[in-house]
Every structure is written in structure tokens, then in C-alpha cells.
Amino acid sequence: MIDDVVDIQMLQDKGIHMSNMLEGKVAIVTGASSGIGEACARALAEAGCKLTLAARSVDKLEALAAELAAECLVAGADMTVPADISRMVERTVATFGTVDVMCANAGIYIPGDFADGDPEAFSELLTINVDAVLRCAHAVIPHMKAGGSGDIVVTSSISGFIDVHWEPIYSASKHAVQTFVHTLRRQVAGDGIRVMSLAPGAVANPLWGFHDPDEIKRVSEGERSYLTSEDCAEALVFMLTRPAHVTIRDLVILPQNQVNV
């Protein structure tokens, strides 16, 4: 019997759930002020993580931190500013001593016809959706290597697996992210670091223009044409709580009734 392999059934028989494996872990969540990032922060706090909450909206982060039963560091950070990303990681290590999980979640969305779009807006999207992901990973890898383990989870999209014609720039950014996840995973696997992609389809959250809870419930539970941010957060916890010898390289989740992709 291999000593470091976790017997999941044995843990469950003893009343120990896999989510308990995150107790005390230090996680950074970018884009934590709303949507998937906020839901992930709530789920990780419930699982016992210590959190760095990062986004531009410091007031929203502070309100979220006040609600969570977890040790939280609020890090105002603009993902288009490299120094903010470096400072976010440095503050995390200075506060908690390490970083175990990087949830590179922050992102923006631009649909529409390419010819009618704004190249400056395209550039900003690529900076946040791609460049910031690279910088987040680059900043935490030395700390994870030093500790011999770590998880980097990137919020991708179904758009990273197929060519979605109504969102060419967004789709291009997520294809880039997928290639990065697949190649970086192989480079750092020997260091005990897992690199994973969480790729949802349509999600009823502010990024897609959904703010009303009743409307979100209608399109997710009734029409089943959208996921919720909480669905994505549950998937994240599942990925992070697999035994160390298991990597969920890509987890694609779709609404039951999303049939346009």
C-alpha cells in the first residue's frame, strides 16, 4: 500500500469529507468581488481556507471579507497592472506564510462582430484574460516549488474548446489559456504542482448581465440554460479536493439546456 495515497472511502466512512482537506490552505482568488470569484471565495472559506481576496473593487471585497468565517486579506489589485499582481502574492506570503492555491479567475467578456469592435478593448481583454493569468502563475510558482505542492486553477470557458463565432476575441483568449494550462502542467508536475482549467458554459452572473436572484433561479433551475456561479464554485472545490495523485486537467461544465455550443 502506498502511504501517500488517500483512501477516499475510508475517509468518508470515518465522517471525514474531502472538503476538509482544504482546512488551513492559503488561497488567492482574483476577481473575487462578484460572480464566480465571489462564489469561489465563499466556498473556499466554508472549506476552511485562508483567503486573499483580490479585485479592483476594494469596498466589495471588504464587505465580502466581513461576511466570511475565514481569515481574509483584502488586496486591491488591478489585473492590468503587473506590480499589483506581484504585490498581491507578496502580501499573501507575508501575511499567511505561503500560498497553496491560486484561483486565476478574473476576466472580462466582449462579444460581437470583430470588424465593429474596439481594438483597445480587445487589448484590455487579452491583458486581463491571458497576460494576468500568466503573471499570477509565475508569481506563485516559486513559493509552491519551495513547499513541494500547490494548485493553480484557471477559470477558462467552453470557448477555449470550440470556436465560438460570436465572441472571437474572448474565444481566442480562452484558447490561449487552455494551451497555457496544458503545457505548464507538464513543466511543473514534477514539483508537486497541479495546473487545472475550470471551463464553464453560460453562467447567470453579472458578467452576463444577471443581477436579480429570481431571474438567476429561473434560467438555471427552470429553463436550465445557465449555470450559477455557485455551480462553478462547487466544481472548483471538487477539483482541489482530489487526492494529490489526481489532476483534473480540464473540467468542462455546461447548463443542461445549453445547445448552441
Image (cartoon, helix red, strand yellow):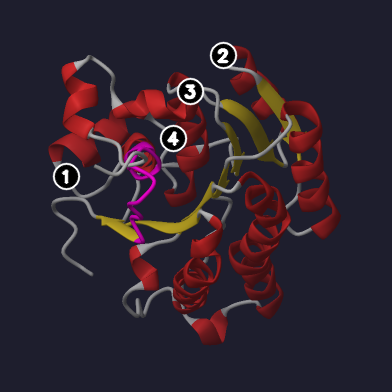
Gap between marks 3 and 4 measured at Cα: 31 Å
What's the amino acid at mark 2? Answer: Glu
In the rendered image, residue 237, in percent from the top left (x then y), is placed at 37, 37
Residue 99 position, x and y percent, is 65, 39
Q: Nearer the viewer, residue 18 or 253?
A: 18
Helix, strand or loop at mark 2:
helix
Judged by its main secondary structure, the magenta piece is loop
Residue beneath label 3, please?
23
Q: Earlier in the sequence, mark 3 or mark 2?
A: 3
Q: Position of residue 113 (x, y in %)?
A: 47, 80
Magenta segment boundaries in residue numbering: 237-249
Nearer mark to the viewer, of 4 and 1: 1
Judging by the rendered image, the residue that carries numbered circle 2 is 67
Residue 20 in the image: above or below residue 39: above
| Mark 4 to mark 1 CA distance (whole Å) | 17 Å
Quadrant in the rendering for residue 228: top left
Identify the mark nearer the N-term, 3 or 4: 3
Q: Position of residue 27 (x, y in %)?
A: 58, 36
Residue lying at 32% horizontally and 52% vertically, measured from the top left: 246
Q: Which residue is mark 4?
A: 211
State if disc 1 and disc 4 touch (CB < 8 Å).
no
How crowded pointer 4 is (Cα within 10 Å; few <14, some 14-19, many 20+) is rated as: few
